[in-house]
Image (cartoon, rainbow, N blue to C red):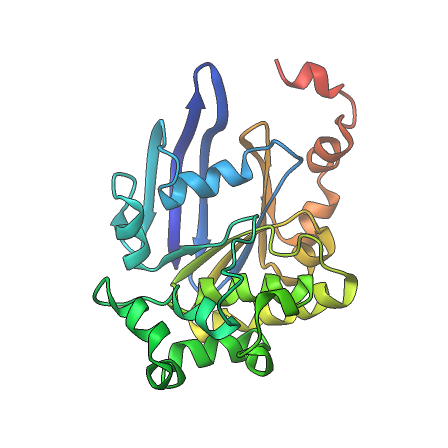
Amino acid sequence: MSLFETRHLSVRYGPVAAVDDVTLSVDDGSIVGLIGPNGAGKTTFIDAVTGFTPASSGEIDFCGHSVGDRPVHERTRLGLGRTFQSLELFEDLTVAENVLVAATHDRWWHPLVDVLAPSRRQGDRNVVEALRTMDLAGAADRLPTELSHGQRRSVGLARAIVSQPRLLLLDEPGAGLDPSETTALGGILRRLPKQGTTVLLVDHDMSLVMSVCDVVWVLDFGRVIATGTPAEIRRDQQVVGAYLGRSASTPRRQERR
């Protein structure tokens, strides 16, 4: 069953179409990949879906709701979460406190109260579960400056899952990870659907995408050029051409016309 769908979604900056008439869907309980060469429009697509960039046209449906005209906070309340390529951690807060301030609260002052009240923080089940999921339970009281790059990435992901989103859009979560860290990340991502979080994964690490995703969508120049299982995408000549800068028979420069 489709949890999320875009229909003819476009984002234009003047005459340039960063996202061009994209129609795609994500089934509930799945891990879906969104790949493409640099500049293909992947991050712009995430920005438009989550409300950080206005769409020029098209529709966005999530959990049975049309969300294209809703502000960021309303989409978040419905269960639409995301990560960013850049890590903006609070360096003077512990790992647990970094995760806590991203938790969903009923009142605006609750994050401040929780940070200042350790007893409340220790009892926050969502924070404890997010740290456990990301294998960070042993680092809860450490500062981000004491962590490896891979652990810092894990903190960013823990902040994204602490509010238990229905759909999580991940923008390059594997950036800068070594092979062992990437393998560990893949194991964590596979657990998320079992915990109720569907995943849309954007990453340049093809080994990660192909090993964890059920379905992969491919963008090039803002348009969908292919969709299928990882095995089908590996064999798709148009996808191969997009990554090599040419198709099997046509120079990429001609394809842009």
**Quarter of the image with the N terminus in it:** bottom left
The residue drawn where x is 39% and y is 43% is: 49
Q: Quadrant of residue 207?
A: bottom right
**Where residue 222 sits: x, y (%)?**
54, 30
Asked if residue 24 is positioned above or below residue 40 in the image, the reply reads: below
**Residue 139: horizontal and vertical position, in percent?**
59, 78
Front residue of 22 and 134: 134
Q: Nearer the viewer, residue 82 or 238?
A: 82
Q: Quadrant of residue 154?
A: bottom right
Q: Position of residue 38 (x, y in %)?
A: 65, 34
Q: Residue at x 46, y 62 (%)?
A: 160
Decide if residue 186 is in sight here: no
- Residue 34, position as x, y percentages in the image: 57, 46
* The image quarter in which residue 150 lies: bottom right
Left or right, 16 with reference to 4: right
**In the foreground, 198 or 183:** 183
Residue at x 38% of width, y 66% of height: 101
Residue placed farthest to the left in the image? Answer: 107
Q: Is residue 19 left or right of residue 121?
A: right
> How many discs mark residues in the rendered view?
0
Q: Quadrant of the C terminus?
A: top right
Q: Is residue 119 above or below residue 198?
A: below
Q: Is residue 41 visible?
A: yes
